[in-house]
Structure formats: structure tokens, C-alpha cells
Image (tube, rainbow, N blue to C red):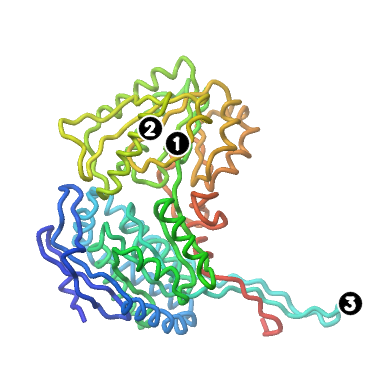
Amino acid sequence: MRNDSLFQLQDANTPFAGRHLIDGVWQGEATAEFHSYMPAENRALPWTFPEAGSAELQALMQSAQTAFGQYRQTSRAARAAFLRQIATEIEVLGSVLVETVMAETALPQARVEGERGRTCNQLRLFAGLLDEPAASTYLPAQPQRVPLPAPELRLDTVPLGPVLVFAASNFPLAFSVAGGDTASALAAGCPVIVKAHNAHPATSALVAQAIDKARQACDLPAGVFQLVYAQRHDFSAQLLQHPVVKAVAFTGSELLGLHFQKLIQQRAVPVPFYGELGSQNPLLLLPEQLALHGAAFATALAQSVLQGNGQFCTRPGLVFVPDQPETGAMLDMLTGSFTATSLVTLLTAKIAEGYRHSCAVLNGLPGVTQLAEGRSALVEKGCQVLPRLFITDAMRWHELPQLQHEVFGPATVLIRYRTLAEIAAILPTLKGQLTCTVYGTDQDLQALQPLLPLLVDCCGRLIRNQMPTGVEVCSAMQHGGPFPASTDLRFTAVGTASYQRFVRPICWQNFGG
């Protein structure tokens, strides 16, 4: 058993040996081969972690299955209390958590504190949902109905079972160990197994500690929440294909997500796979809006693309701008914003390498021009990259399928169009998106009306006159969309409706109201 004091990391030079949390016990021996990393300094941290194997897999699944039998029977009030206690325990971690996240991600303090607030708020949001009576539909029996009597029917939901959550890299708190997937699954009555992300393992240990303390305080089964570390891909495959797992939540690359989906379909009994795989979040600037508010648009776009160093899944990566007299001034402003930047630090060296490769591909495409690049006396290396701005013409769209490949990082592609007819020809070819955004006046929108159904078909959230970076966590949010934005466009990964991913309908006939 591991004492809490061993989790009190002091600074980036303090050795720390992490462990798995399995069946309520911290176990497994850390190895030097699996260590945390400090992207800001491109160096390893003295924080090491264990590698899971067959013994850990068996223990995880046995504990989760046992816990499900008990946890599914808990009251909504008990689950609400658990979620609120998790939020409290995360807040109790204080500066230790903030400093650990900053060390492992290079995210600034204000961003980390804001994400911590979002994480705790969404836990409490689900608790509030559980405070309300469970939704059900009841129809009384009609024994006198002719020609046949009608039975008594009640439509309800039941939890699916143990849920496997793959923590995301770009939101080390809000989409990670205690993020929206975990919160919604626990709210639904499902035990959770989290595969910690290799980019922030110490952060994962701290948050797991908070969840386990909340579990103990609420006297819940040990297997309600478990955390496991693994760098090997074959262990992730074994997790995905284990029969105890009844649903999987994943946020990551399209390539890995498709691989996971294939593995799940190979199971003897396939289960739901809720994957968020990628989005370019196209943005359409309309003519009158540009003429009246071009400068404000340029400022907002630069801020949105560069926010979080471009590592938001809602970053606008394809921006359609009209080719008209005011376009030049707007482009000058955008170019100035990008050239005023310097090296920025991405979450991992792998992400940075992928970003540099994607930008090199764009720069080599015929008809694509790099308008701007950040300036630095230092060379891009490790986790450090330069922001970039590209431009091409709408007439080349159909010749350049590479434009639809997501560039994860601080870059965007401007696409000049002359008429809305060019946009109408492009929209049916767009891949599924989390968001589509329109910047336009009322007069602009009147001209755009015939194209709105095409925009709706592309995305899960259609936005007007506001950048897509920023997702409100509430009951009215849809964070998902047609493939590859998500693998099941009927559900959201953000907001209280995400609870529906981890329950299924059950009809009770003649059991009483």
C-alpha cells in the first residue's frame, strides 16, 4: 500500500516512483525505461512508472467486474456525492497538482488552473444531473383496450458495465484521468479503468490519488476506479478486447483511433467505441463581414489558432476568405500576428515532430504558399516549433486532398474563394468536423441560406461570429460530429448528455410503476 505523502511531488528534480492503482492498492514497480518528460526543457524527469502486463490485466478486470455488481445498485444520490468528493479532493491537491501539470506539459499556470476548474465544475455538473429524478417513460396497462389489451410499460436505462478510458494528451485534466469521460461513466453507474497517458503520468497519479480518496470516503468498492500505466501497444489492445470492458472512450489521432476501432470490431462481442479522432474545424468568412470587420476578424483568428499553441481539437485549421479589395489588409494583419511569434512548446516531441512534418507537406504542395512563420534565432527541435500561416485558392481544393489532413499545432490554411458557388462545390467533400463556423452579417447569412444544410451535414456544432476554440460544458453542448470527428455522431463527449454513452435502454413490462 502506498502512503499519500509519497505523492507530494516538490519540484522537477525530486525522484518519484509511480504505481498502478488496481483494486484499491498502489502496486507495481517503476522502471527507468518509463519516465516522465519536461517538454519545456526537452529533458527527462526523474519520475518513473511501471509497465503493466498479464497479471495487472487480470486483476484490473476482476476488480472492475466485481465492483460493477455493487456500483450499479448505488443510488443517484450516492453517485452524486462521490463526484462532488472527487472534485473536492482534486482541489485539495492545490499547487502540487498545478506545478506537476506545468512540468509535464509546458502549459502556463493560468491555463492549468482554468482547466482544473473546468474539471471540477464538470464533476459537479454531473452530480447536479444525478440530483434530478431519473428520466423514464411510463405507460399504464390498458386491460380494456380492444382488440387487444395493452401491457404496463416503463422505459428506463441501465449502466453498460466497466468503461475503459484512454486519457488524452492535450487536456491533462479535463479529458484525462478525472475528465468528462470518467465523470460521465461514473455518473452512469459504470466502473472506470483509465489507461494513463504517457505524456503526463505523474499528473495522472495525483488525480488518481484524489479519486481513490473520494472512493474511500464514500465507502465504494475498490474496483469503481482504477488506473494503469503501459507504454506497450499490445497491452492497450488487450484492454480493448477484454470481455469485461463494455465501452471505450478515446480522444486522439485518427490513425490510432481507427486501429482501436478495428480491434474492438474483432472482439467476439463488439462494444461501443466513442472516439474523437480529428477535426479541421472549417471557418467561412463572408464578404460583408470582411468589409466591415476585417481587422477584428484577423485579431480573433490569430488568437484562436495560437491559443494553447494550437493544440485544441477545435482550432480552426481551414479558413475560407473572400477574394476582394479588403482581403489584403486582413492578410497583412494576420501575417504580422504570426511573424511576431517565436518558438512555442508543444506537449510532446512526437506531436512536435508530426507538426513539423505536416507543415513541410503543406509547404511543398503546388499552389500552397507559406505566408508567415514565427521568428526565432533558435532552431526548431524537440518539443519546440514555430507557428505558421499558409494560403491557397479554392479552385485548387479538389487537387489537394492533403488539405484535409489535420495539422495539430499552431498553424492554419487560408483558402481564397471568389463566389459562394466555389464553397458550395467544396462543402460536400469535407470530412466530418467537430465544428463549422460562419462569420457573417445578416445580409451575408441571407445569401448563405441555401448552403446551411451542407454545413449542418458536416459538423456537430455550427457557430456564428465566434471562434470555435472554447467549448461550453453544459446540457446544450454537442462535442462530436460525423466521422472522423467522432466514431458515433449521435453522442457528445462534453456536457451532461455525454452520460447517455454509458447507459442502454431497458423496457420493464408489467413490473409496476
Residue 287: percent from the left, percent from the top? 52, 23
Residue 467 x %, y %: 43, 38
Instruction: Please state which of residues 138 and 235 is positioned toward the viewer in this rendering.
Output: 235
Q: Amino acid at mark 3?
A: Val
Mark closer to the chain start, 1 or 2? 2
Q: How many marks?
A: 3
Instruction: Say whether residue 135 is visible.
Output: yes
Q: CA distance from mark 2 to mark 3?
A: 69 Å
Q: Residue 87 is drawn in which quadrant? A: bottom left
Position of 165 with respect to 155 (left or right) is left
Circle 3 crowding by C-alpha within 10 Å: few under 14, some 14–19, many from 20: few
Residue 318 shown left or right of residue 10 in the figure: right
Using the image as rendered, state which of residue 262 and residue 297 is in the foreground. 262
In this view, the mark in front (2 or 3): 2
Q: Is residue 139 left or right of residue 236?
A: right
Q: Which residue is mark 2?
A: 362
Instruction: Assess whether mark 2 and mark 1 are in contact (beta carbons under 8 angstroms).
Output: yes
Residue, x 41% and y 82% (percent of image)? 67
Disc 3 element = loop
Residue under pointer 1: 402
Residue 353 versus residue 182: which sits nearer the camera? 353
Q: Which residue is mark 3?
A: 146
Q: Residue at x 21, y 63 (%)?
A: 34
Q: Secondary structure at mark 2?
A: helix
* Residue plotted at (59% across, 70% down): 135
Say which amino acid is labelled 2.
Answer: Leu
Structural distance between the alpha carbons of marks 3 and 1: 63 Å
Task: Give the secondary structure at mark 1.
Answer: helix
Which is nearer the N-term, disc 2 or disc 3? 3
Mark 1 to mark 2 CA distance (whole Å): 8 Å
